[in-house]
Amino acid sequence: MVQISKKTYFGTWTALLVLLFATCFFSRLDLKAFNTPIAMGIAFLKMVLIILFFMHMRYSRRLLWVFVCAGFLWLLIMIELTMSDYLTRGFSWSQ
Amino acid sequence: MAESELLAEQFDDLAQQEETCTVGMWTFLSTEVVFFGGLFTAYIVYRSTYPEAFAEGSHHSDLLLGTVNTAVLLTSSLTMALSVHAAREGRRKALTIFLGLTLILGVAFLALKGIEYSEHISEHFLPGRNLKRGLPHGTELFFLLYFVMTGLHAIHLLIGCGVLVVLLWLARNSRFSARYYTPVEVSALYWHFVDLVWVFLYPMFYLIHG
């Protein structure tokens, strides 16, 4: 595997800390319906940074991408099917 | 060390062995995604059912401690990545230092988490007979998920610390070189994953606005 420069690691870490303070700052503001999407969006960004650079996914073979995405895909299916049940309970066409 | 000593007999060469170990670790981490995923799903279901109760519960979390702890864990991921970097260059001393730093940061995280737990318990937020009265209906579910999810995360981190102790011992005995450092690389993947879980737990339990 290629050697990744220390600069990349420190850059990733700086970006992660900036995102941490951003998410902390935004949570103090009253953004109504946008608070949760912003917090989760920033968490997702941090996840992508960690997986791509700290976990070397950017430098790995495509085969590994399949293994990485598999778990997240099944998690999404689980959440999607569960919430399509819970969020539509009590729903009626006649309302 | 000769290649024959480092290579398990089912592999052709060290590169193939390393790739197999990496894929194996990611397979395990995929099962971990779904393992934590059940709890994440439960959280989404109950937060959408009791939004006010979850916001109320979140206001009792220590935002400062949580944020500091997140920074500690993110920094431990940096030192772990740097130990892989040092291992790749065959720098034994740097490897030992960075593994040691990672271990210290991991233990610091657990210590801060312990302080937080004792604060929560002394304020009667542990679900059960002594749960504080007068909280909105559903807050006990917030605290139940809080203790179970952060507790499960802490157990993972504790295991990670144990792995680091083994790595430190192996590194001190010169078991790694620029040619062979697969255990460091694979353990780093696990460590980063545990960090990843916390990245999501932090906004879920500390940052609910309402």
Image (cartoon, rainbow, N blue to C red):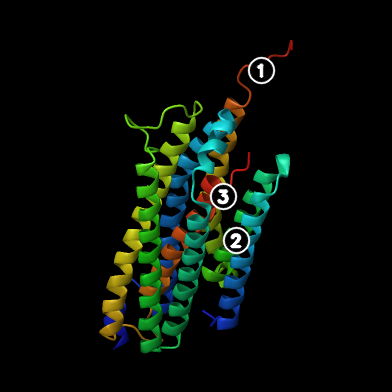
x and y, in percent, of residue B46 in the image = 52, 32
Chain for disc number 2: A
Chain containing mark 1: A
Label at residue B203: 3
Instruction: Calculate the distance from the C-alpha at mark 2 to the C-alpha at mark 1.
Output: 39 Å
Q: Marks 2 and 1: which is nearer the front?
A: 2
Which secondary structure, mark 1? loop
Among numbered discs 2 and 1, the one appearing first in the sequence: 2
Q: Secondary structure at mark 3?
A: helix
Is circle 2 on the same chain as circle 1? yes
Q: Are marks 2 and 1 in contact (CB under 8 Å)?
A: no
**Pointer 1 local density, CA inside 10 Å: few below 14, some 14–19, many at least 20:** few
Marks 2/3: CA–CA distance:
10 Å
Position of residue A84 measured from the top left corner of the image (x, y, whole percent): 61, 29
Q: Give the residue drawn at x 53%, y 42%.
A: B58
> Horizontal placement of B120 versus A60: left or right?
left
Amino acid type of the residue that numbered disc 2 sits on in the rendered structure: Leu
* Separation of marks 1 and 3 at Cα, in angstroms: 30 Å
Q: Which residue is mark 1?
A: A91
Query: Residue B69 or B151: which is nearer the viewer?
Result: B69
| Residue at 59% across, 36% down | A80
